[in-house]
């Protein structure tokens, strides 16, 4: 049972344009969501997070939107840069989960110059 | 944030042998976890490393196969025992500080031949 789903395995975007990465979840007990970026041969790097009490969180070029009714969140990167090319993982956690994360399958973003 | 060092970064092992992976965090953390990323798949939680007591394993993972130690707040080890080619994966150590963001080591790429 995949509780966190990223249905797009890959996404290609032109440099300077917006990248939108999507994530869906099924467990209504999740109340904290995170996005990680992963380059080959490196561990995941934390990007941005959002609590279920919010519907938007912004940090520089990165914005995460949360739609609790739809159990959907998205990561917007504006403007996209070639250095953003990586695999992006969505992760979710519940307040009683002690920091354990459930990850989506990942979306490989390619930003073309 | 926390800086997490994992070693070895990669290894090629013979089937039937065991490998111990070490994880060192540069600051005291509340929680430490071990994840596995099999080829082409997402990150899956193996277990929570509990300081001074037995680890808490997720469904599908057992102590005999993946013994874990955590003698203090900043160090943990994961052993992959009696390895088979199916154990070929990236193994990742993760730590959570007072906040809820989890930080990751660079991972250990294990190939079993």
Image (cartoon, rainbow, N blue to C red):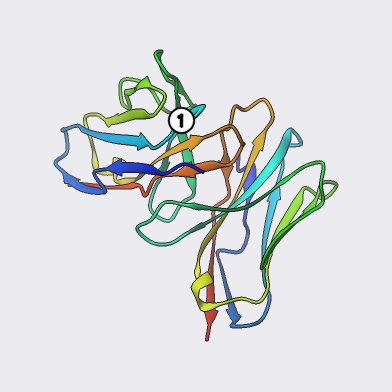
Image position of B67 (left or right of B32):
left
Residue B102 percent coordinates (x, y): 53, 40
Label 1 marks a residue whose chain is B
Instruction: Name above or below for residue A37 compared with residue B56.
Output: below
Q: Name the quadrant of the N terminus of chain A.
A: top right
At 26% from the left edge and 48% from the top edge, which residue is drawn? Answer: B9
Query: In the image shown, does A23 or B113 lie closer to the viewer?
Result: A23
- Kindly give the residue lying farthest to the top in the view shown: B53
At 42% from the left edge and 20% from the top edge, which residue is drawn? Answer: B55
Query: In the image shown, does B105 or A25 lie closer to the viewer?
Result: B105
Q: Quadrant of residue B112?
A: top left
Can you identify the residue that label 1 sits on?
Answer: B32
Q: Quadrant of residue A6?
A: bottom right
Image position of A24 (left or right of A6):
right
Residue A58 percent coordinates (x, y): 73, 59
Residue A18 percent coordinates (x, y): 68, 76
């Amino acid at each position: 049972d995949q509780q966190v789903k990223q249905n797009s395995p890959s996404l290609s975007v032109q440099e300077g344009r917006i990248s939108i990465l999507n994530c869906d979840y099924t467990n209504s007990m999740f109340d904290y969501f995170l996005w990680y970026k992963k380059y080959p041969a490196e561990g995941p790097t934390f990007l941005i997070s959002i609590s279920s009490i919010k519907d938007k969180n912004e940090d520089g070029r990165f914005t995460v939107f949360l739609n609790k009714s739809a159990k959907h969140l998205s990561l917007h990167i504006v403007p996209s840069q070639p250095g953003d090319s990586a695999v992006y993982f969505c992760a979710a956690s519940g307040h009683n989960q002690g920091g354990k994360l459930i990850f989506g399958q990942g979306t490989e973003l390619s930003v073309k110059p | 944030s926390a800086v997490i060092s994992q070693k070895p970064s990669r290894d090629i092992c013979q089937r039937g042998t065991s490998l111990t992976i070490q994880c060192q965090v540069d600051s005291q953390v509340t929680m430490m976890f071990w994840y596995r990323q099999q080829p082409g798949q997402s990150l899956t939680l193996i277990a929570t490393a509990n300081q001074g007591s037995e680890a808490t394993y997720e469904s599908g993972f057992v102590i005999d196969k993946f013994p874990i130690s955590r003698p203090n707040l900043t160090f943990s080890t994961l052993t992959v025992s009696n390895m088979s080619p199916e154990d070929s994966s990236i193994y990742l150590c993760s730590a959570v500080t007072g906040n809820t963001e989890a930080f990751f080591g660079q991972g250990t790429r294990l190939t079993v031949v």
